[in-house]
Image: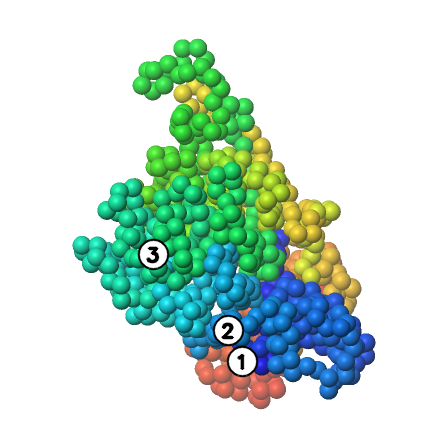
């Protein structure tokens, strides 16, 4: 039995308020009891004995449901309330004494009885997870998925479906399932199928790496792949140049396309006997593998005796294809909405842009001809036609300009961006339009904008760099369908839809390209710009994980969503909760210069932006339009009830920075406020000016006031030089803790002598601190 205390099992929801990003409080269980590592069996919520014995039960039950734990305990130190979710106890909930707490074996025995687990099945279910010693462990939902799959397979279920939102680690989950079944000796030969080369290659060198020499790829093309840690690895291949199979391996990975095809000679999978594989894992199984007439389906039918696990973020249910019909109901589901609520997935903003020809359609006048001189068919053309059967080039230029406007207004033109186009030809024109809109950055590096499509060899060669967080280029990528699924673009911050998306499955997959959180680069949310109305899928009851903001700019509006939010019934609270922690402190002021209405003429057809709209939503559904300045003012008013209260606190604080850190820990960062009010104001003036409506002085003005008072004539020239240097540090860099001895070690003070020598110019260390405190008091002396 393993007992873990204070187990945080979620990350804390990411909350976006304009440019301010915070994390809510993670869910944390007091104690979780594991029968074996990653197999939780009981949860205990502990309160002190001023509470009643059962006060923690309701919270513990909520956690138990999330963690799939059957036995729930609440305690105040005097005894326990025991809740049995299995229903096998004589009472659903009962009070027990401290010495009546059940043993691990008693709990496990009851668990096995509840699940109907036999001794033979128990051996598989208790097989250890892989542990590399680094401390990495599955997230709670991954453990739930792994344990549910192992239990189902141990009981003889041969078709298993796992539904996990994009970005939640399906491949790592699959690895742990395979590892445990392989180590238990129940599944000795395994096939992992995917439909993207990059997925197979990255899976081999990263998540599946522990299989080592037992693993090979069903391919004739040798490759050197870079692992997550930067080490390059040569892939082991199971095919020779004549496509003969080496059957000595135990774990095989392959592309559907590489082992099957229209002609018999392409059906490499037939080189294996039908009973060769014990286990087949199908990645992204929504993309046709379960369709009865699909070429890929014949692989699964050939190995029909094998246990088959389907992995998908979006199970496909149509008139023609049903994952559930083939695999059965999911043994576990982890949705996009749940991932966002838990803080494992990034929330997102949506910008809807309406172009007039899209809204109203385009009908040629009699006699209108195309560029080749052919008469255009007389009918109404709409968004489904544009760039598929009818090309209006300046519409493409307009889209490219609006995307580029967004990047320029956001002050970060190096946000990794995917632009989804109608087809490869449209992607090529979009690439050209984006190049022309960003000539300055393309002059620096031609890979700033690239097309990555199935037929574009040069573009595909850059796919690895695009998804590499450490690679700067390419930045803007145009594609049609290649990047819509499976590509792990961790740092993708902007997704642009310039094609219709009729399938809910594909729409969820496209949204999933941006949902990965990347804390190293401060990527906690992303933006989706929709030119084709694809985000109407939000209205579908099958969609979960709605955006935190929908913005529809008008003709004169900037592309970036406003930071000002209005408090209403449908959004997150405008002020960060005391449990929230700031994770991004914005330092960029959005350009709000408004453009005049403009029209783009294409072959005599006008195209212009019609409308864009703003809504702020979260799971509580409240709408906000209160400015950052206003909600910060309200929050600080609660913190400091009066100007005198603030002044006393500021003057008494030995470290001024400690006050700023306290505010940041409460979700009140002053940096965004500085952007709005003026960056040369220090925190003292920001608070006095914004909260208490006092006139604000810049740092230079405060420093000059001290110089005018000539307050330090009593010190000798060397000591006065030190004080002047400290004053200059405050003026130039906003240093507010002038008494920190480390300041004496940086330029220009380090050239004036050692810290010990500089302090001796004042006498003792106490004398030095007295002089510094005097300087700070003079700095913050309030004018009458």
Residues at circles 2 and 3 in contact by the CB criterion of under 8 Å: no
Determine the residue located farthest toward the top in the rendered image.
366
Residue matched to label 2: 120
Horizontal arrangement in the rendering, residue 511 relative to residue 303 (left or right): right
Residue 576 visible in the picture: yes
**Residue 116 location, x and y as percent?**
60, 68
Write down the quadrant of residue 141 in the picture.
bottom right
**Residue 450 location, x and y as percent?**
34, 44
Task: Identify the mark at residue 37; answer none if there is no mark.
Answer: none
Residue 425 higher or lower than 108, as above or below: above
Mark 1: few, some, or many residues within 10 Å (few <14, many ≥20)?
A: few
The quadrant of the rendering that contains the C terminus is: bottom right
Secondary structure at numbered mark 3: loop
- The foreground one among 283 and 186 is 186
- The foreground one among 481 and 86 is 86
Q: CA distance from mark 2 to mark 1?
A: 68 Å
Residue matched to label 3: 274
Whichever of callouts 3 and 1 sits on the residue coming sooner in the sequence is 3
Q: Residue at x 51, y 34 (%)?
A: 532
Q: CA distance from mark 3 to mark 1?
A: 75 Å
Residue matched to label 1: 741
Horizontal arrangement in the rendering, residue 370 relative to residue 66 (left or right): left
């Amino acid at each position: 039995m393993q007992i873990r205390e204070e187990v945080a099992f979620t990350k804390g929801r990411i909350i976006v308020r304009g440019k301010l990003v915070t994390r809510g409080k993670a869910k944390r269980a007091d104690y979780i009891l594991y029968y074996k590592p990653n197999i939780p069996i009981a949860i205990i919520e502990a309160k002190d004995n001023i509470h009643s014995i059962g006060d923690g039960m309701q919270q513990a039950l909520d956690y138990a449901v999330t963690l799939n734990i059957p036995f729930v305990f609440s305690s105040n130190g005097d005894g326990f309330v025991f809740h049995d979710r299995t229903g096998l106890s004589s009472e659903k909930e009962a009070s027990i004494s401290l010495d009546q707490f059940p043993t691990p074996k008693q709990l496990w025995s009851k668990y096995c009885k509840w699940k109907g687990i036999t001794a033979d099945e128990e051996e598989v279910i208790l097989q250890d997870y892989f542990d590399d010693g680094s401390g990495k462990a599955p997230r709670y939902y991954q453990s739930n998925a792994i344990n549910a799959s192992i239990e189902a397979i141990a009981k003889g279920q041969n078709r298993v479906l796992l539904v996990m939102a994009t970005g939640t680690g399906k491949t790592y989950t699959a690895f742990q399932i395979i590892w445990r079944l392989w180590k238990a000796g129940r599944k000795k030969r395994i096939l992992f199928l995917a439909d993207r080369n990059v997925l197979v290659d990255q899976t081999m060198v990263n998540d599946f790496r522990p299989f080592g020499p037992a693993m090979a790829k069903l391919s004739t093309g040798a490759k050197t792949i870079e692992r997550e840690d930067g080490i390059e690895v040569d892939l082991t291949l199971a095919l020779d140049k004549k496509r003969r199979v080496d059957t000595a391996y135990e774990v095989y990975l392959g592309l559907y396309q590489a082992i099957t095809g229209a002609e018999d000679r392409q059906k490499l999978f037939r080189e294996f006997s039908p009973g060769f594989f014990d286990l087949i894992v199908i990645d992204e199984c929504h993309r046709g593998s379960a369709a009865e007439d699909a070429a890929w389906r014949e692989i699964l039918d050939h190995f029909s005796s094998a246990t088959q696990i389907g992995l998908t973020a979006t199970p496909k249910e149509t008139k023609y294809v049903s994952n559930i019909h083939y695999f059965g109901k999911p043994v576990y589901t982890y949705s996009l909405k749940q991932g966002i609520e838990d803080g494992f997935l990034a929330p997102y903003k949506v910008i809807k842009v309406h172009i007039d020809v899209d809204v109203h359609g385009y009908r040629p006048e009699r006699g209108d001809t195309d560029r080749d001189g052919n008469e255009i068919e007389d009918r109404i053309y709409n968004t489904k036609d544009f760039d598929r059967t009818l090309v209006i080039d300046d519409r493409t230029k307009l889209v490219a300009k609006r995307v580029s406007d967004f990047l320029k207004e956001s002050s970060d033109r190096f946000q990794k961006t995917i632009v989804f186009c109608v087809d490869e030809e449209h992607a090529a024109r979009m690439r050209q339009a984006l190049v022309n809109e960003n000539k300055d950055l393309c002059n620096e590096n031609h890979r700033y904008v690239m097309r990555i499509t199935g037929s574009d060899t040069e573009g595909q060669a850059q796919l690895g760099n695009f998804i590499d967080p450490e690679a700067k280029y390419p930045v803007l990528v145009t594609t049609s369908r290649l990047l819509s699924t499976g590509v792990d673009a961790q740092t993708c911050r902007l997704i642009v839809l310039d094609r219709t998306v009729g399938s809910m499955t594909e729409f969820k997959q496209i949204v999933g390209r941006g949902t990965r959180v990347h804390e190293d680069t401060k990527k906690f949310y992303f933006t989706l710009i929709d030119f084709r109305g694809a985000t109407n899928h939000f209205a579908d009851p099958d969609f979960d994980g709605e955006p935190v903001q929908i913005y529809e700019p008008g003709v004169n509006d900037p592309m970036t969503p406003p930071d000002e939010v209005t408090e209403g019934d449908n959004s997150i609270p405008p002020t960060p909760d005391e449990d929230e922690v700031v994770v991004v402190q914005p330092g960029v002021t959005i350009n709000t210069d408004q453009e005049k209405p403009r029209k783009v003429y294409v072959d005599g057809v006008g195209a212009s932006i019609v409308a864009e709209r703003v809504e702020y939503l979260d799971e509580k559904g409240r709408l906000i339009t209160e400015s950052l300045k206003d909600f910060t003012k309200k929050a600080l008013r609660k913190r400091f009830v009066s100007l005198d209260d603030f002044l006393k606190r500021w003057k008494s604080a030995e470290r001024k920075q400690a006050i700023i850190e306290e505010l940041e820990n409460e979700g009140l960062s002053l940096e965004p406020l500085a952007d709005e009010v003026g960056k040369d104001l220090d925190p003292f003036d920001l608070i006095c000016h914004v909260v208490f409506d006092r006139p604000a002085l810049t740092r230079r003005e405060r420093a000059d006031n001290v110089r005018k008072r000539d307050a330090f004539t009593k010190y000798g020239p060397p000591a006065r030089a030190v004080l002047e240097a400290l004053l200059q540090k405050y003026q130039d860099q906003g240093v507010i803790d002038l008494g920190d001895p480390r300041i004496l070690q940086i330029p220009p003070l380090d050239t004036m002598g050692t810290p010990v020598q500089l302090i001796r110019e004042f006498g003792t260390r106490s004398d030095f601190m007295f002089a510094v405190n005097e300087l700070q008091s003079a700095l913050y002396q309030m004018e009458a």
